[in-house]
Image (cartoon, rainbow, N blue to C red):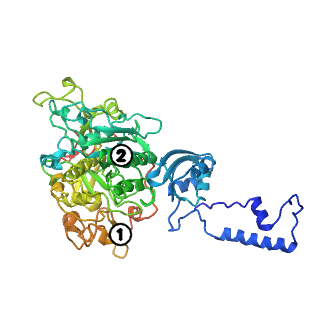
C-alpha cells in the first residue's frame, strides 16, 4: 500500500511552534522556554503522524477505500496520469465535492446519485487528495464493460410456449434492456401494427446520443425477451417468438458500435430505470454484459447500483460471462463469473447447449462462466438457459451483422425446404453466449409478474430456482469450432439451480417474505471440502433458510433447490480432491479460494462475436460438426 504524504504548511509551523516573522505590532519574538515547548509539541505531532496508520487507506470497518486496480496505478504510475474513476461518497455529493476535484485538474463526467457517487476524469494526484476527504467512502476505476455474447428450439426447451398458452405474454410489464441499443425491428411492434413497444430510449454512451443499435447485440437480446415473431409468420422455418412477446421495452443504450462501454454509463442507465419505474412499470432489468471482478461486491460501484434496482423492486437479471473455457490460471473455467453477476441479490444466468430430443440430453455450454465468484465466493450462476446458436432479431447495418454475415438467418420458400438470399433479406441473426440465455430468464420473470404483480424480486428468483429442471447427467463433453474438447461436470458452480422452466415457474405458488440472496461457499482446509452457508447471517430472513418457503431445515438443501444428482461429490460436499478441478495443491485451487485475485482485464474476457459457440461431437467417430 502506498503511503500517503502528510504536509505541514508554514502556517501550521507558525501556529504550533509560535515562530513567525512578526506582525506590525512587533510580536514576532517568543521566549526560549515557550519555543522549546512548542518544538516538543511539533515533534510529538510528527511522531504521531509517522507512527499512526494511514487514515485514508481504509474505512472504519477495515475495508479498503481504493479498489485494487486503482491502488496499483497509485503505486506504480506518475501522479500526472489521468484516469477515469467512480467515487462513492458517504453523503449525496454536493457542489463542494465537485469543486474539490475541479480544483485539482479533474472534471465530472456523470452524476451517479443512485449510489451517492460521481464519475470523474482526473489525475492520480487528485485521487490522493480525495482520500483525505472524510466524505469519500471508496474510489474505483470506471471500468470498461462489454456484452456477454457468444435456433427456434430454445423457447420450447424452456417451456415458454406452454407458459404463453396460459394467456400470459408480458402485457403491461416493462423490461429495461441495458445494452447496445435497440433497432426498430418489426417484431418489437404491437403485433400487426407499426406501433413500437419500445416505449422509451436513451443513450448513455459518451458523446453519442443515438439510441439505435450500432453493434447489433441489444436488438438480439430484446427479441429473445420480447419479440413477437410477426416477421417470421411466413418464409421462415420457425417462428422466433420471445418469451414475453407483448412486454414493453425500455431501451437504455450503454454499449458503443464496438460493444464496449463503462461502469458509469451502466450505472447511469440503471439509475434512469429506477426513475422511470412507475411511469413504464419497469419490473425487470436485463444486463447481458459484464467485466472482471476487482473487489468485493460490497464495494464495487456496479454491484451497488444493481442492488439499488433490486431494492426498488426490480428483478435484475445478469449474464454470468463467457470465460468457461479459460484455463489460463488452471481453474478449468471455475471462478470466472463477471461483475455484476457476482452480486448475491441478482439472478445470474449461465448458458446451455440444446441437444435434442429432450432436456435430459442438454449440457452446459463450454464457454459459460462458472462460480464461485472471486473474492466473495458467492455461489453462481443461479440458473441456466439456452444460449448456444440462438436465433433472434437482426439489426441492419450493425457491426455484428456486417462482420459476421455467415450468421444471417435467411427467409425460405413456402415449404421451408430451401432458404437463402433469393427469398429475401435476412431479419434474424444467430448468436451464442450467456447474453442470449439471460433475456429468456428476463422474459419469464415478466410473465410471472404479469400473472402476479405482487411478486417481489426475491420470490421471482426463488420460484425460478426451485422450479428449474435438474435432471442432468453428471458429466458431459463439449467441443469448440477448432476441435478443442472440454470436460464438464454437473455441480452447482456450473449449472446453478438448473435449467429454466418457464411453465413450472408460473405454476409455482410458494409465497413468503425474506431475501433470496445467493449463498456463500466456504472452504474447509481441514477436510478439503466446500459447503455453503447464508450470505447474510440471519437465516430466518432468508427464503431458503430454516424458514424456507417450501419447507426444509437444510440451507439450499440438495432436494430443495438442486436435486441430489447435481451434487457430484455428495449432497453436503461441493468441492473435493476427487473432482476435475483437482486438490488444494493445484495452483487453480488457490486462485479460486484466494481473497485478492484480480481476474482478466478491464473488459470482460468472453468469446469473440465470431465464435460459432459449441459444436456437436459425433458419438461414433468423435468428429466435430459445427454446422
Measured along the vertical axis of the image, is residue 408 above or below residue 323? above
Q: Which residue does the numbered mark 1 point to in the structure image?
A: 522
> Are dots 2 and 1 in contact, CB under 8 Å?
no
The quadrant in which the C terminus is found is top left
Q: Observer-nearest residue: 598 or 583?
A: 598
Determine the secondary structure under disc 1.
Answer: strand
Instruction: Rate crowding at label 1 as few (under 14), some (14 to 19) or many (20 or more) other CA atoms within 10 Å.
Output: some
Q: Identify the residue shown where x is 31% and y is 69%.
A: 541
Marking on residue 276: 2
Q: Residue furthest left?
A: 415
Q: Residue furthest top?
A: 422
Instruction: Rate crowding at label 2 as few (under 14), some (14 to 19) or many (20 or more) other CA atoms within 10 Å.
Output: some
Q: Tell me if residue 476 can be seen.
A: yes
List x then y, in percent, for residue 300. Answer: 44, 56
Please tell me in which quadrant of the rendered image residue 476 appears: bottom left
List x then y, in percent, for residue 171. Answer: 21, 44
The quadrant in which the N terminus is found is bottom right
Q: Identify the residue shown where x is 36% and y is 38%.
A: 201
Measured along the vertical axis of the image, is residue 27 above or below residue 241? below
CA separation in Å, label 2 and label 1: 39 Å
Residue 620 left/right relative to 556: left
Q: Observer-nearest residue: 498 or 624?
A: 498
List x then y, in percent, for residue 174. Answer: 28, 45
**Mark 2 vs 1, N-terminal side:** 2
Viewer-nearest of labels 2 and 1? 2
Q: Tell me if residue 221 can be seen.
A: no
List x then y, in percent, for residue 294. Answer: 45, 56
Q: Residue furthest bottom?
A: 526
Determine the secondary structure under disc 2.
Answer: loop
Q: Identify the residue shown where x is 40% and y is 33%.
A: 210
Amino acid at each position: 500500500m502506498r503511503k500517503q504524504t502528510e504536509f505541514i504548511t508554514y502556517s501550521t509551523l507558525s501556529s504550533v511552534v509560535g515562530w513567525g516573522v512578526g506582525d506590525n505590532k512587533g510580536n514576532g519574538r517568543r521566549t526560549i522556554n515557550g519555543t522549546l515547548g512548542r518544538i516538543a509539541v511539533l515533534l510529538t505531532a510528527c511522531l504521531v503522524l509517522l507512527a499512526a496508520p494511514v487514515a485514508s487507506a481504509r474505512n472504519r470497518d477495515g475495508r479498503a477505500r481504493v479498489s485494487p486496480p486503482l491502488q496499483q496505478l497509485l503505486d506504480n504510475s506518475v501522479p500526472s496520469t489521468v484516469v477515469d474513476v467512480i467515487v462513492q461518497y458517504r453523503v449525496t455529493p454536493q457542489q463542494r465535492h465537485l469543486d474539490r476535484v475541479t480544483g485539482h485538474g479533474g472534471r465530472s463526467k456523470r452524476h451517479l446519485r443512485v449510489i451517492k457517487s460521481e464519475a470523474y476524469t482526473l489525475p492520480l494526484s487528485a485521487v490522493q487528495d480525495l482520500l483525505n476527504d472524510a466524505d469519500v467512502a471508496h474510489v474505483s476505476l470506471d471500468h470498461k464493460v462489454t456484452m456477454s455474447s457468444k435456433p427456434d428450439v430454445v423457447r420450447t426447451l424452456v417451456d415458454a410456449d406452454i407458459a404463453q398458452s396460459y394467456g400470459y405474454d408480458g402485457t403491461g410489464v416493462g423490461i429495461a434492456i441495458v445494452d447496445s441499443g435497440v433497432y426498430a425491428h418489426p417484431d418489437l411492434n404491437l403485433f400487426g401494427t407499426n406501433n413500437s413497444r419500445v416505449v422509451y430510449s436513451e443513450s448513455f454512451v459518451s458523446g453519442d446520443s443515438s439510441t439505435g443499435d450500432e453493434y447489433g447485440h441489444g436488438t438480439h437480446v430484446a427479441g429473445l425477451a420480447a419479440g413477437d415473431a410477426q416477421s417470421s409468420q411466413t418464409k421462415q422455418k420457425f417462428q422466433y417468438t420471445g418469451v414475453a412477446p407483448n412486454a414493453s421495452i425500455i431501451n437504455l443504450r450503454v454499449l458503443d458500435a464496438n460493444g464496449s462501454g463503462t461502469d458509469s454509463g451502466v450505472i447511469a442507465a440503471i439509475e434512469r430505470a429506477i426513475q422511470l419505474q412507475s411511469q413504464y412499470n419497469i419490473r425487470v432489468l436485463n444486463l447481458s454484459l459484464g467485466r472482471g471482478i476487482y473487489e468485493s461486491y460490497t464495494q464495487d460501484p456496479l454491484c451497488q447500483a444493481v442492488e439499488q434496482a433490486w431494492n426498488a423492486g426490480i428483478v435484475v437479471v445478469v449474464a454470468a460471462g463467457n470465460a468457461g473455457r479459460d484455463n489460463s490460471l488452471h481453474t478449468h473455467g471455475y471462478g470466472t463469473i463477471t461483475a455484476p453477476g457476482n452480486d448475491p441479490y441478482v439472478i445470474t444466468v449461465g448458458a446451455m447447449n440444446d441437444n435434442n430430443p429432450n432436456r435430459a440430453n442438454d449440457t452446459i455450454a463450454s464457454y459459460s462462466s462458472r462460480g464461485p465468484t472471486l473474492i466473495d465466493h458467492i455461489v453462481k450462476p443461479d440458473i441456466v438457459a439456452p444460449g448456444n446458436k440462438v436465433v433472434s432479431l437482426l439489426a441492419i447495418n450493425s457491426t455484428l451483422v456486417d462482420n459476421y454475415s455467415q450468421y444471417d438467418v435467411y427467409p425460405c420458400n413456402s415449404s421451408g425446404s430451401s432458404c437463402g438470399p433469393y427469398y429475401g433479406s435476412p431479419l434474424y441473426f444467430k448468436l451464442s453466449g450467456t447474453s442470449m440465455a439471460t433475456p429468456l430468464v428476463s422474459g419469464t420473470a415478466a410473465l410471472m409478474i404479469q400473472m402476479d404483480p405482487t411478486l417481489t424480486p426475491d420470490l421471482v428468483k426463488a420460484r425460478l430456482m426451485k422450479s428449474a429442471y435438474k435432471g442432468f447427467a453428471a458429466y458431459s463433453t463439449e467441443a469448440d469450432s477448432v476441435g478443442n474438447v472440454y470436460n464438464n461436470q454437473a455441480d452447482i458452480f456450473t449449472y446453478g439451480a438448473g435449467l429454466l422452466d418457464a411453465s413450472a415457474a408460473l405454476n409455482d405458488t410458494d409465497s413468503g417474505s425474506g431475501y433470496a440472496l445467493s449463498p456463500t461457499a466456504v472452504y474447509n482446509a481441514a477436510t478439503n471440502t466446500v459447503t455453503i452457508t447464508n450470505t447474510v447471517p440471519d437465516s430466518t430472513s432468508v427464503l431458503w433458510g430454516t424458514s424456507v418457503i417450501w419447507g426444509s431445515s437444510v440451507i439450499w438443501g440438495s432436494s430443495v433447490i438442486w436435486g441430489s444428482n447435481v451434487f457430484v461429490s455428495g449432497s453436503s460436499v461441493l468441492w473435493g480432491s476427487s473432482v476435475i478441478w483437482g486438490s488444494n495443491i493445484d495452483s487453480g485451487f488457490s486462485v479460486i479460494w484466494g481473497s485478492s485475485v484480480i481476474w482478466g482485464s478491464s473488459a470482460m474476457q468472453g468469446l469473440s462475436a465470431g465464435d460459432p459457440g459449441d459444436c456437436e461431437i459425433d458419438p461414433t467417430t468423435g468428429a466435430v460438426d459445427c454446422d
